[in-house]
Amino acid sequence: MKKFISVVLLIISAFALSGCSKKYDLYVYNWGEYMDPEVIKQFEKETGLTVSYENFETNEDMLPKVANGAGSYDLVCPSDYMIQHMIEEDLLAELDFNNIPNISNIGSQYMESSKAFDPDNKYSVPYCWGTVGILYNKKMVTEPVDSWSILWDKKYKDNVLMQNSVRDAFGITLKYLGYSLNSTDKEELEEAKEKLIEQKEDGIVQAYVVDQVRDKMIGESAALGVIYSGEAIFTQRENPDLEYVVPKEGSNLWIDSWVVPKNAAHKENAEKFINFLCRADIALMNFEYITYSTPNEAAKALIEDENIKNSTVAFPDNATLARCETFQYLGEDADELYNELWKEVKS
Amino acid sequence: MNNKRKKYLAFPYVLWMAAFIIIPLFMIIYYGLTNRNRQFTFENLTIIAEPSNLKALWLSLKLSTLSTILCLILAYPLASILTKIKMKNKSILVFIFILPMWMNFLLRTLAWQTLLDKNGVINTVLTFFHLPLINIINTPGAIILGMVYNFLPFMILPIYNTLSKIDSSVVDAARDLGANEFQTFLRITFPLSLPGVISGITMVFVPALTTFVISDILGGSKILLIGNVIEQEFKYANNWHTGSGLSLVLMVFILISMALVSKYDKESEGNIW
Amino acid sequence: MVKKTAQRFYIILILLFLYAPIITLVGLSFNQSKSISRWGGFTTKWYTSLFENDAILSALYTTLTIAFFSAFIATIIGTIASIAINSMKRLPRTILLGITNIPMLNADIVTGISLMLLFIGLHYTLSFSSVLIAHITFNIPYVILSVMPKLKQTSRNTYEAALDLGASQLYAFFKVVLPDIFPGILSGFLLAFTMSLDDFVITHFTKGPGIDTLSTKIYTEVRKGIKPEMYALSSLLFVTVLILLILLNRRTNKDKATDFTKK
């Protein structure tokens, strides 16, 4: 028995060793399904570097893995407010833009918007961006949709899908009420909470979902849903009756950008990869795969499909963008307040 | 003599437990009893008394108790039928009931959503036959269904295991002595299978009480369970202190419920409860 | 006869309940559309693209190795521990069983984060082995919960009789106790294997860069829609195991037949 166990242990440790002995030249940590696998293959082919590509589900899932530094990632793609949080926590390394000449392909307005969370454009390179809006089914909603107020219309009882995330749900409600979506004012937030509770008590909300908005809208289980603009193009392809609008009260403009953590072991390779991603042909390939709007002007010019190139969903006009705001990191106390109020809404 | 020696067999396990269960547990206790400024506080524990948290806890207890009872009602007859089937390789038979769990949990739960949705598979079939539609998606009913579905095999297995061990001569003796089928079951079979039932109840009740994925997907997140509250504290509020505190409270609740269950476990006299 | 039909019916009903989502998933693997709520026509393209997808295949490899080894080690540790615990006096036994259940009592996220903190505190780099250790830890309770009831039913008399007849302790254990509790051990192993296959949260927090399992892949894909290749892979896994089962069953049935003729 003893012999048996010791043999087993030996096998396991040998196994475990072989399992972790595989080393890569670059560790990329990105949202799920947020890059065309071909892009990585091509990068590996062109540079000879090996890439380990892994995914996270939410910004909040990613943070402890990067912050605690038990095994380091070289390149991460968080959202705006999370980048601000990471800068404040001193987790990010300044990028060497000499290694990223293709940054010139990124439209200057996106670099400008990035200043909301990265004031000197020192830490981040925009990757994807978009808005939050209402996706509705033209067969079920015949009136024009241009305001968040339709999400509170009792006509659509049990027919509205809300976002199941604190900041998104409160963000659109604050916008509807005419406040900033970065509000930390207790009274404004209480008012938003009351609105959300009213919406739920009236039975208008069918479900709070994140990802299933897409599938439920395609399957026509609901008439209206709050969704990210990047998903809108995909859902329209699957069900042509769906339409996307950014309400007149304004909405959230979000940007996901590449950053390099301070403890990254392969910073130069990471910058090489950012540069590669900013190349027009690569950015185009990526855009076609993930359908989220690209900040890459050179890639946008290469889009052949005129419908998409001129689509106001993928590339909203400046008037729409002027109404939108970027999320900011509000600090721990505000986070707690939001969370508390959200719990009251849900229970 | 022999028993004393046997005890030492627990040594590797005790070491393992100390390293990977007890030390992490103390970390949770540490987080649960401190606040962000590392000061000692009971706040993370007393926060359970807030109405929204209490409601979530109450709902979780209700739903998981209901699902556990349903699992037991469904699993017991099944396990006893399985023991009576004459087949040489019975483990294969039992395996058929675990096999569905080899499909990823999330995929299975999403599949239920596809089945139950307003315009889902089941309703499409029902419309075809002009039958009344079911509308349980996004209700507590769907959550219970999800729990029963996901945890049923955990109830079937241990009950089947103990039932198949029961000596049939004991049962026959009871029948010979004039007990009817129901009496035999109540006085002989059921008491003998209790250890399995209790294992099953533990394995169903506990994960059902802490789940958050099922209520998110099948309940449309409209129903907040205590698992969702803890998840939210850790993930969205990034507050490990409150999250740990609430988990400690939840652990106490589970321990109390398990103690209540074990009380009826006459077989395991070794239990202190 | 009526009773037998009713029993058959009941088994079929439960099987239908358990397999309904599985059938749905197999159906989805042939769906042309990437969305789970729309039927876009029949296709087998996801099966071809599955075998070209190195990321999924290597995740499958990692998942299976972790599941197998964690279940195997947990079964050994758990079975030995059960035997020891079973021979203990009340108090230590209760304490040990109580501690055993802790990983089950905690929400997954708590277990995951606390283990991560432990590894970081020990300056142990998160890697393949940290995931393995975490899985073994949460698997052990399932093994103990399966083996203990069996042990309680085993009568000490046969074991002692074997000893009286001159068998060594080890021999008596392997020849008398082990066959008795083996179904429990087997179901413990199966449960452990299953739990390990399914786990996402704990794996997420204890894994290091460069390691991906099927569940970590699936969970992170949800935001942009699960790749139909995943349904294809799950269906393939499922069908493979099913065929293996049927073959095994055939063989044992044949054995039975030959047994019969011998008699």
Image: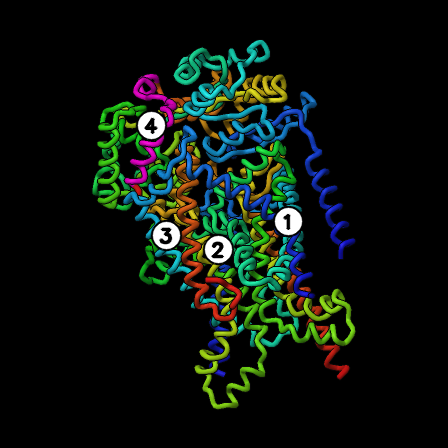
Separation of marks 4 and 3 at Cα, in angstroms: 28 Å
B5 or A86, which lies in front?
B5
Judging from the image, what secondary structure is the residue with disc 4 in?
A: helix
Residue A338 position within the rendered picture, expressed as x and y whole percent measured from the top left? 32, 32
B132 or A125, which lies in front?
A125
Callout 2 crowding tier (Cα within 10 Å): few <14, some 14–19, many ≥20:
many
Which amino acid type is shown beneath numbered disc 3? Ser
Q: Mark 2 — residue?
A: C21
Q: Mark 1 — residue?
A: C70
Up-down relation of residue A316 to residue B113 (above or below): above
Magenta stretch: includes residue A342: yes
Judged by its main secondary structure, the magenta piece is helix
Magenta stretch: includes residue C166: no
x 51%, y 47%: residue? C31
Judging from the image, what secondary structure is the residue with disc 3 in?
A: helix
Up-down relation of residue B89 to residue A152 (above or below): below
Residue range in magenta is A318-345
Separation of marks 1 and 2 at Cα, in angstroms: 27 Å
Q: Mark 3 — residue?
A: B60
Which amino acid type is shown beneath numbered disc 1? Ser
Which amino acid type is shown beneath numbered disc 2? Pro
Callout 1 crowding tier (Cα within 10 Å): few <14, some 14–19, many ≥20:
many
Same subunit: marks 3 and 2: no
**Chain letter for the residue marked with disc 1 in the picture:** C
Residue A339 position within the rendered picture, expressed as x and y whole percent measured from the top left? 34, 35
Separation of marks 3 and 2 at Cα, in angstroms: 24 Å
Callout 4 crowding tier (Cα within 10 Å): few <14, some 14–19, many ≥20:
some
Same subunit: marks 4 and 1: no
Looking at the picture, the colour scheme in use is: rainbow
User: From this viewpoint, which residue is outermost toward the front?
Assistant: B1
Q: Is residue A306 visible?
A: no
x 25%, y 46%: residue? A203
